[in-house]
Amino acid sequence: YDAGDVVVSGGDLEGAQRRLGAAVTALLDHGHPVTILGGGHEVAYGTYLGIAGSAAVRDGARCGVLNLDAHFDLRSDATPSSGTPFLQMARAEKSRGRDLRYAVVGIAQSSNTSALFTAASELGVRYLLDDECRIAHLPDVETFVGEFLATVDLVHLTVDLDVLPAAIAPGVSAPAAYGVPLEVVQHVCDLVARSGRLAVAEVAELNPAFDIDNRTARTAARLVHRIVTGRPPGAP
């Protein structure tokens, strides 16, 4: 069912992230799998707050973030934005005495600065470049995802639609010149959904003003459908 909208009012992004977090925590604590529809990728920090505040994590469950994205989104900006959510998460985890378990599939080397690669290295972020995510490399992608899943009890799966080629997902703010094939992105979503560890999924960065024939929206809907119907037998 539709659990409602969280709206940014008066430019108060951080307040909206906190409200989203509270809504996600309440849903998780009542046993619901949750799917968040963005919006920009700043939605990911609100989702993180929801998982971090959930009873499962408070009781010691290990949670990790798997991001399908062309960008690290680890920018150190004074004002939170769609480019900062995973650094915000890392800082929040550090304040709790933990390291952020963060992995990315689809990084575009030309779309990330050397400072971002340095930040990723310092934070222990594991990633695959988009060049390493061809269909021919699917076994390597499966290994990467499997190794990540083995380190966590709960997964925050986040899909930034700009990870896909521009021909598949033109309706984003930063269309990919290369991108990760839809077959690979869908397969990663399937692996996570069937793992039994998925707590929250989100699909972000759809910009209808830039879409063509609802192409991006249809792709996003397909991925959401795969995620919510691909849960293991007996899951809610």
Image (cartoon, rainbow, N blue to C red):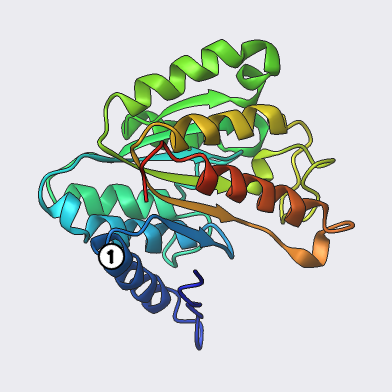
Judging by the rendered image, the residue that carries numbered circle 1 is: 25
Q: Secondary structure at mark 1?
A: helix
Query: Residue at image x 39%, y 55%?
Result: 33
Residue 145 lies, in percent from the top left, at 44, 24
Q: Residues within 10 Å of mark 1 (few under 14, many from 20)?
A: many
In depth, the one of 236 and 144 nearer the eye is 236
Query: Residue at image x 22%, y 59%?
Result: 54
Query: Residue at image x 32%, y 29%?
Result: 124
- On the picture, is 130 further left or further right than 103? right
| Outermost residue to the front | 234
Give the vertical position of 160 relative to 146 (above or below): below
- On the picture, is 214 further left or further right than 4? right
Residue 217 lies, in percent from the top left, at 74, 56
In depth, the one of 153 and 228 nearer the eye is 228
Please identify the quarter of the rendering in which residue 13 is found: bottom left
Give the vertical position of 118 relative to 53 (above or below): above
In depth, the one of 60 and 89 nearer the eye is 60
Kind of residue indicated by mark 1: Thr
Query: Residue at image x 58%, y 38%?
Result: 112
In depth, the one of 117 and 24 nearer the eye is 24
Give the vertical position of 127 relative to 82 (above or below): above
Q: How many marks?
A: 1
Residue 83 lies, in percent from the top left, at 52, 54
Res. 46 in view: yes
- On the picture, is 62 further left or further right than 207? left
